[in-house]
Amino acid sequence: LKVLDDSLSCSQISQYFARRSIDGLGLEQFNLNDSQLNAVADCVSVMENHSPSLKLIWGPPGTGKTKTISTILWAMLIKGLKTLTCAPTNTAVLEVASRIVRLVGEAPDGSPCFLNIVLFGNKERMKIDDNHDLSMVFLDSRAERLLPCFVPHTGWRQCLSSLIDLLENPVTKYKLHIQALPFKDYLKDNYNKLSKDLCYCIEILYNDHPRNSETGQSFQCMLEVLELIRILHALINYDRDTDDICSDELLEGKVEEECNPVSWPQQLNSVRTNRCNKSRFKLARSLCVQELRYLRKNLELPNYYSTRQIQLYLLQRTKCILCTVSSSFRLYGVPPNLLDLLIVDEAAQLKECETLIPLLLPGIKQAVFIGDEYQLPALVKSKSQSLLESKSLLALCPHIML
């Protein structure tokens, strides 16, 4: 433990311990100045304190307030904490959303994941179409893309079960088939259709479903399944060896029940390097069924019929939520999933009563208000004080951006 000089002030000691709270978060890559780094460190360190607190960050235009917000959000994502970021206007919210998505997208190790970020609001006013950079995190767009995976009878669960059944018991299923069709044609047609449907679901879930430490293995499993599906597709559709592959002895071989994800990369490598098609098919089939079973057990999706249900599902599971202050009322309809931190950008542009909309959400104990009470809004409609201004008058010391 570093020994501090007795002459250090209380604020210097506080800054020292606050700085320690951001060790290992990789914030050095953002080139923050001292005032920005102190603000980030203070906001991160307060999350370890269970008592309620309100932090103020003040700075005129051009002092890096948005950069500071996005860095705080980055740190919260790394720590797995749930945040709500609000601003009075769509423009301000989109600016923060663009910045944090860009930071996450540029992360060299892919952590944190942008799939844990969600933006919601009026799609037309925000001007977000399918080609917009923020479409990948926009709530309405994600819910629409995910809907096919949640629908019963044709969705994720059905696709997994259907392909597992075909690969486990193709001969038995063929005997129940009433049409006069050669077995190898039956296997080829059904495998091609079912694997295509499953690949479609995997692509959607991999690109739009939130992630956490518990589902990390499932998403790695998806990539391995896609490769195994391609290998099996090539073998099943290769006419020269189809007769050997379609032998009852090979296809009726029991697939092991053992499920050990740690060994799967090594088994997949054996499939890649195997030169005997018959042996390669047997190994690929066995490994594919094991991984499909794992996905069916560990990535269960509820049955939903509407995008509204999926929106609630996403809001419960994402870690970084962004919206306007007025839109935050929608979160009162989300089943309890307590927020750890509220961040309000351009807080000086809001009246106290407006700030209460997100501030009264269940579970919020920590809040950060960012703005400049001397900066006039585009249109002065009221002489009412903002909460940021009133707290400043109460001698609540803000972090000053330089």
Image (tube, rainbow, N blue to C red):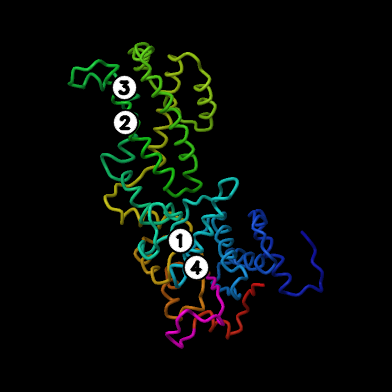
Nearer mark to the viewer, of 1 and 3: 3
According to the image, label 4 marks what residue?
A: 342
Mark 3 secondary-structure assignment: helix
Between 153 and 243, the residue placed more toward the observer is 243
Mark 2 or mark 4: name the one nearer the start of the chain.
2
According to the image, label 1 marks what residue?
A: 321
According to the image, label 2 marks what residue?
A: 194
Q: Distance between the Cα atoms at labels 1 and 3?
A: 45 Å
Query: For residue 237, which quarter of the picture?
Result: top left
According to the image, label 3 marks what residue?
A: 188
Against 68, is 238 above or below? above
Amino acid type, residue under disc 2 in the picture: Leu
- State yes or no: discs 3 and 2 in contact (Cβ < 8 Å): no
Range covered by the magenta-colored residues:
367-385
The number of numbered badges drawn on the structure is: 4
Nearer mark to the viewer, of 2 and 4: 2
Mark 1 secondary-structure assignment: strand
Amino acid type, residue under disc 4 in the picture: Leu
Residue shown at 25% from the left, 39% from the top: 153
Give the percent coordinates (x, y) of residue 317. Answer: 43, 54
Against 116, is 191 above or below? above
Give the crowd class for mark 3: few <14, some 14-19, many >=20 residues within 10 Å: some
Q: Distance between the Cα atoms at labels 2 and 4?
A: 45 Å
